[in-house]
Image (tube, grey):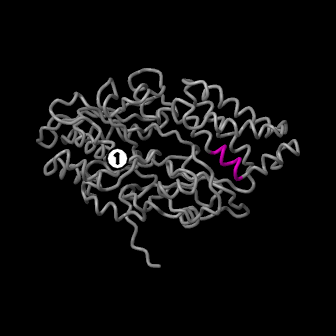
Amino acid sequence: MNRKPMATPLTQNITPHREPPDLKQYAQAGGYQGLQRAIKTLTPQEVLQEVKESNLRGRGGAGFPTGLKWSFVPRGDDAPRPKYLIANADEMEPGTFKDRLLMEGDPHQLLEGMILASYAIQAEVAYIFLRAEYWLAAQRLKKAIAEAYQVNYLGKNLLGSTFSLELHLHTSAGRYICGEETALLNALEGKRAIPRAKPPYPQVSGLWGQPTVVNNVETLCNVPHIIARGAAWYQNLSRSEDGGTKIYGASGRVKHPGAWELPMGTPIREILEEHAGGMKDGFQLRGFLPGGASTDFLTEEHLEVPMDYDSVQAAGSRLGTGSLIILDDRTCPVDMVRNLEHFFAQESCGWCTPCRDGLPWVEKILLGIEQGQGQPEDLEYLMMHTRLLGPGHTFCAHAPGAMEPLQSALKYFKTDFEQHIHQQRCPFK
């Protein structure tokens, strides 16, 4: 089948191991055309409507429609002021590095997306909440921000309009829980990073009690292209109902681990075999986490599933960050899950008891099984924890997310757990 040439708007300016484009180079490649069009010819409501019609959904994992999220912000002359726009750049999902790629490779793209999003919701102040370990991204973003101020893409009265925006880079100590937007807001206010009760939602009462939108880096990087070339063009990039492209990744024992910008809805088999090169010689695929560490395992029977939000959910998992983590036939699934639960237990913010005490208990049971001390009833205890730490029993989605790889491992790899218990050792060692 002849396939039309693939458009890669998000990564078109990114060249590995080279400096990112400066403002002049970014503009020569078509950058800031979306900003020029928006400020000079579109109202904020028209920018919001264009994003709505594009079917852009949040790329941080939840997949909430971006334009709809913006529409919840109070508008009009009597709306509370100031309003805030925040780019969540605290990327800590194991196996995920797409936002780092975008920030290091094309920082002006993120800035333009943030300016457009701020214009749409009429925010006066914007922050980039950046993971401290991303020091190279910090250096390049600082340079880009300074360049944008010099040409009045940031500051007072942008391009001669009445719209003004101040943009700040906040390098945070960060935690995994800061992927939850209200925990991020607490951290930005200098408080303990724990989630807030919702409602009220941040769009109404967010940073310092003011209307706030928090968007993922990849989400915001899509916005300039939607505004510059239109919602219909953006939708046509996709192979599914979800608009645009997506940066998919693959890690584990594949021949070419990495990240690739592909049409939304690209089948898993195509990502794994054509782009990641398939499994390394001598290794066979047993399963994979399709969207990072906090998603359910899928197996070989799911390789034809399109990587979009609804299709992956129908298969029994989540698209998440779109980063495939591969399980091969020489890796112990019990130890892999134990390692993941160790991470989630360490990253619990400790706010609610089921998460604070339950996750270490799950890790302890898995460690016992892996070390040959497991008992048959341990599997019942683990299943019980997947229910007690599941949705509706904890304050936020951290513990339920941690239970997804465990519950699916007990479904697809139960014989491996039973072998550990029966043989009183790890059969992979």
Badge 1: few (under 14), some or many (20 or more) residues near its Cα, within 10 Å? many
**For residue 248, above or below residue 395:** below
The reply, left or right, for residue 363 in relation to residue 389 is: right
**For residue 127, above or below residue 7:** above
Residue drawn 43% across and 60% down?
A: 264
Question: x and y percent of residue 98 in the render?
Answer: 47, 49
Residue drawn 47% across and 57% down?
A: 308
Question: In the displayed image of the protein, which residue is found farthest to the top?
Answer: 191
Q: Is residue 407 on the magenta stretch?
A: yes
Question: In the displayed image of the protein, which residue is found farthest to the bottom?
Answer: 1
The residue where tag 1 is placed is 66
Task: Tell me which segment is drawn in magenta.
Answer: 405-412
The reply, left or right, for residue 155 in relation to residue 426 is: left
Between 326 and 362, the residue placed more toward the observer is 362
**Number of marks drawn:** 1
Question: x and y percent of residue 263 in the render?
Answer: 43, 62
**For residue 42, above or below residue 148:** below
Q: Main secondary structure of the magenta part?
A: helix
Between 386 and 218, the residue placed more toward the observer is 386
